[in-house]
Image (tube, rainbow, N blue to C red):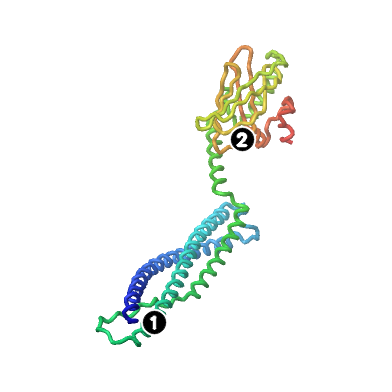
């Protein structure tokens, strides 16, 4: 009676367990293959990092961080070491994740094996006390999952965690000195923008000026202000300039600013311009200024020359670019509210 009520369910449980063990074994084999690939990759990167470190010791024996070295070759090596550490972190994190998955799977298989032992013992006890039954086909031996070195894998996880901590600490130290990829990209964009600006030769028709050109433009104004051939102009007239900025075909800023007269039909003002395409209008005259998107909001000087007979001239230049010049022309006639002479020292 006991055999009739228990044997069928026990066989079903055993069959399911055998099937699951087979699937788990296949999955375990695939995980082991991926783990081996990650381990090989980590060891290769570690050897490469060790080589970088040995080279850095030879070319940079000083105690200061190699990222601060005036030698560009040393800084290049330091940047290369940082890149390897970042790749090592990514590979090690994947390796830890797979190891932890494998440990959990192994624990589940061990628990399943224990349950199968209990079921098998119950079936054997029932068969011993049951009356003889019709002969049946012999059942295959129960497939137990092989023993798994959980302690060894757990130690590997702990060791990899310590490696990660060291890599993170080293990267944190380097990040205090080395620029981020975003900062490097912004510097490269700024360099290209400066090169593009310098390729256009200076002329009265050039609107946006570099730092050296701004110094030249201010020097030209200084010369005209002392030229007796140029007539004086009213000092109570302050032309209004309308400033509109568009970014990605969207109007993002509209502003009206008055320019301060400094004599002989010259006017000047300080404004903040945003990235994008800016149109500056003074009455019927218009000028366009294009600022790259990475530049951010900057302070600019606008100079306007409106001769009695002639074409108006308008120039725009960044205050920082002018002050970055080695010996810029900072004329004494500049209005105090522009706050340029103070910054120039």
Residue 244's place in the image compared with 131, above or below, is above
Where disc 1 sits, the SS reads helix
| Front-most of residues 214 and 14 | 14
**Quadrant occupied by the N terminus:** bottom left
Return the residue found at the far front: 1
Q: On the rendered structure, is 202 left or right of 22? A: right
Q: In which quarter of the image is residue 292?
A: top right
Total numbered badges shown on the rendered structure: 2
Q: Name the residue under label 1.
A: 122
At label 1, counting other C-alpha atoms closer than 10 Å, the crowd grade (few under 14, some 14-19, many 20 or more) is few
Which mark sits nearer the N-terminus, 2 or 1? 1
Q: Where is residue 283 in the image (x, y as percent from the top left)?
A: 60, 16
Where disc 2 sits, the SS reads loop
At label 2, counting other C-alpha atoms closer than 10 Å, the crowd grade (few under 14, some 14-19, many 20 or more) is few
Q: On the rendered structure, is 337 left or right of 47? A: right
Residue 151's place in the image compared with 135, above or below, is above
Question: For the point 57% across and 16% down, which residue is it?
Answer: 284
Q: Residue 340 carries which label?
A: none
Q: Residue 297 carries which label?
A: 2
Residue 183's place in the image compared with 61, above or below, is above
Question: For the point 67% across and 24% down, which residue is it?
Answer: 268
Asked if disc 2 and disc 1 are in contact, CB closer than 8 Å, the reply is no
| Front-most of residues 109 and 222 | 109
**Quadrant occupied by the C terminus:** top right
Question: For the point 42% across and 67% down, which residue is it?
Answer: 36
Q: Where is residue 322 in the image (x, y as percent from the top left)?
A: 65, 33
Could you give the CA–CA distance between mark 2 and mark 1, rounded to whole angstroms?
80 Å
Q: Where is residue 34 in the image (x, y as percent from the top left)?
A: 41, 65
Q: Nearer the viewer, mark 2 or mark 1?
A: 1
Q: Position of residue 77 (x, y in %)?
A: 54, 56
């Amino acid at each position: 009676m006991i055999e009739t009520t228990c044997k069928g369910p026990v066989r079903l449980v055993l069959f399911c367990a055998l099937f699951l063990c087979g699937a788990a074994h296949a999955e375990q084999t695939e995980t082991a293959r991926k783990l081996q690939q990650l381990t090989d990759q980590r060891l290769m990167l570690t050897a490469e990092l060790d080589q970088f470190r040995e080279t850095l010791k030879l070319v940079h024996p000083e105690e200061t961080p190699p990222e601060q070295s005036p030698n560009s070759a040393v800084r290049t090596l330091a940047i290369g070491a940082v890149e390897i550490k970042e790749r090592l972190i990514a590979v090690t994190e994947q390796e830890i994740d797979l190891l932890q998955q494998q440990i959990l799977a192994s624990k589940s298989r061990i628990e399943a094996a224990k349950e199968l032992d209990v079921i098998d013992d119950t079936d054997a006890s029932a068969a011993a006390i049951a009356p003889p039954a019709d002969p049946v086909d012999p059942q295959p031996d129960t497939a137990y999952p092989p023993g798994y070195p959980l302690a060894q894998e757990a130690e590997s996880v702990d060791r990899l965690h310590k490696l990660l901590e060291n890599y993170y600490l080293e990267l944190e130290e380097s990040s205090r000195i080395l620029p981020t990829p975003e900062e490097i990209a912004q510097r490269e964009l700024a360099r290209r923008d400066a090169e593009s600006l310098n390729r256009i030769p200076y002329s009265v028709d050039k609107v946006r000026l570099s730092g050296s050109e701004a110094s030249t433009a201010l020097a030209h104004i200084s010369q005209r202000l002392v030229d007796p051939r140029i007539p004086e102009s009213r000092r109570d007239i302050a032309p209004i300039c309308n400033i509109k900025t568009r970014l990605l075909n969207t109007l993002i800023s509209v502003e009206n600013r008055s320019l301060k007269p400094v004599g002989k039909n010259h006017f000047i003002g300080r404004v903040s311009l945003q990235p994008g395409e800016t149109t500056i209008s003074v009455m019927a005259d218009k000028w366009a200024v294009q600022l790259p998107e990475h530049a951010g909001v900057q302070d600019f000087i606008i100079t306007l020359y409106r001769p009695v007979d002639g074409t108006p001239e308008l120039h725009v230049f960044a205050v920082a670019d002018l002050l970055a010049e080695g010996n810029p022309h900072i004329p004494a006639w500049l209005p105090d509210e522009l706050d340029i002479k103070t910054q120039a020292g």
